[in-house]
Amino acid sequence: MSEADGWVVHRHRVIYGDTDAMGIVYYANYLRFFEIGRTEFVRARGGLYRAMEQDGLMLPVTEVGAKYLASARYDDVLRICTRVQDLGHATLTFEYRLEREGDDVLLCKGFTKHACLNRATGRITRMPDVVRGWVDPPTT
């Protein structure tokens, strides 16, 4: 995964609280990992969710999908790879790949789809230019 391909990679160490009674990362926690990846993606692109919300916009999840391929366990270091898969007039879809660092095993892949909403009215609105700017990597 590389920035040149639009991916932002964030490292995350699995804590004990992420695991179930079998010592494996609980399946629903992958959605939290998606959220971590999304937050770090936006931060890497120079944005903050908080600033967007202060501007009166929200990006709630409207659809999610995950395919589990291998198990993660306590103390594994994960690479949460995130990129924008699709950007529409008022929707945004993120793509995720979670890999275990060390052996590069692909553990899970998935997506979240978001609608852009006006916070005051709750109505769908046009995706702002700041969000459109996340699609292209920042230039240095």
Image (cartoon, helix red, strand yellow):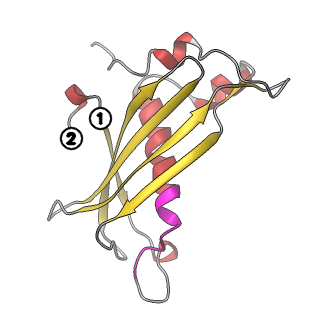
Q: Nearer the viewer, residue 98 or 18?
A: 98
> Which residue is denoted by mark 2 in the rendering?
1
Residue at 43% across, 45% down = 37
Q: Are marks 2 and 1 in contact (CB under 8 Å)?
A: yes
Q: Is residue 65 above or below residue 115?
A: below
Mark number for residue 46?
Answer: none
Distance from the alpha carbon under mark 2 to that under mark 1: 6 Å
- Secondary structure under tag 2 reads loop
Mark number for residue 7?
Answer: 1
Q: Is residue 111 above or below residue 99?
A: above
Image quadrant holding the C terminus, namely top left
Q: Amino acid at mark 1?
A: Trp
Residue at 37% across, 57% down = 12
Image location (x, y in percent) of residue 101: 21, 60
Q: Is residue 116 left or right of residue 27?
A: right
Residue at 41% across, 24% down = 45
Magenta-highlighted residues: 24-31
Q: Amino acid at mark 2?
A: Met
Residue at 33% across, 17% down = 138
Mark 1 Cα shell of 10 Å, populated few (<14), some (14-19), many (≥20): many
- Secondary structure under tag 1 reads loop
